Image (cartoon, grey):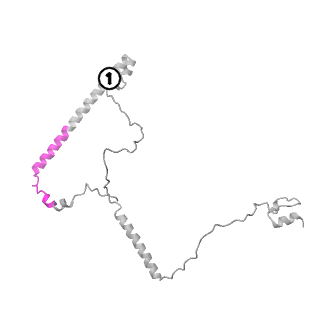
Amino acid sequence: MSINNLVSSLTRLSLIKVPTLIRNVSLNAPMLFRSTPVLLAEPLKKKKKMDPAIIKAREEKKKKKIEKAIRKLEKNARKLKPISECEIPFEILDTLKNRQRNLPGISEEILENRALLEKKWCRYKREQHLVDMQMLDRIQFAQQKALDELRKESEQLYQEAIQPDLMMMPYKIEGPVETPPIENYQSPDGDYNDVSKKW
């Protein structure tokens, strides 16, 4: 049996032509010694045998507690945080009946007069709005007509006339300067105590 037949039967080198003198047994990476990490484990404690009824009762208790928490969250989900300034004090709520006035009912004649007055006011405001719109239309039409006549006379004068006048409304602004904060700066507002409630 030749050396090639021996190598092909024992290793994966059958596809490689091996010379007659073989010094390397394997062409794969050398096998090195490796150590596994030290696992400081201890033997497991023996499980105590418990009654299945007790285990089931504990699981039911946990389940009920979680369901109760979910119901509480769902109940308070859409409630907004209360604003203490908007709440009515209990002293006022206790004396609410004493604070209410018993006013006499409004007669039909007064109600009719109020409705007629409101209609009159609406008519007046509508007419005023129409007059204002017509006046603005007349002014705009006259301005456009004057610009068209000016354009016929001189294109240069027309271009100067349609430029906006920046001096009509002078506007000046100074932005904040970029300076580093002053160290140990004492604020003139004094101490601030945050008394807002935590939710």
Residue found farthest to the front: 184
Residue occupying image coordinates x 42% and y 76%: 60
Q: Position of residue 141 (x, y in %)?
A: 30, 26
Residue at the spot of label 1:
145
Q: Which residues are magenta?
A: 96-124
Taking 104 as reference, is 132 left or right?
right
Residue occupying image coordinates x 42% and y 73%: 62
Residue occupying image coordinates x 44% and y 81%: 54
In this rendered view, identify the residue nearer to me: 146 or 195: 195
In which image quadrant can residue 174 be found?
Answer: top left
Eyeballing the image, is 42 above or below 98? below
In this rendered view, identify the residue nearer to me: 51 or 133: 51
**Tag 1: residue type?**
Lys
Is 44 inside the magenta-drawn segment? no
Q: Position of residue 199 (x, y in %)?
A: 35, 59
Q: Which quadrant is the N terminus positioned in?
A: bottom right
Taking 33 as reference, is 166 left or right?
left
Q: Position of residue 129 (x, y in %)?
A: 23, 35
Tag 1 secondary structure:
helix
Q: Position of residue 175 (x, y in %)?
A: 38, 35
Taking 102 as reference, is 37 left or right?
right
Residue found farthest to the top: 153
Is 97 inside the magenta-drawn segment? yes
Number of marks in picture: 1
In which image quadrant can residue 181 be found?
Answer: top left
Eyeballing the image, is 19 above or below 177? below
Residue occupying image coordinates x 76% and y 62%: 30
Taking 97 as reference, is 154 left or right?
right
Instruction: Give the crowd class for mark 1: few <14, some 14-19, many >=20 residues within 10 Å.
Output: few
State whether the magenta stretch is mostly helix, strand or loop.
Answer: helix
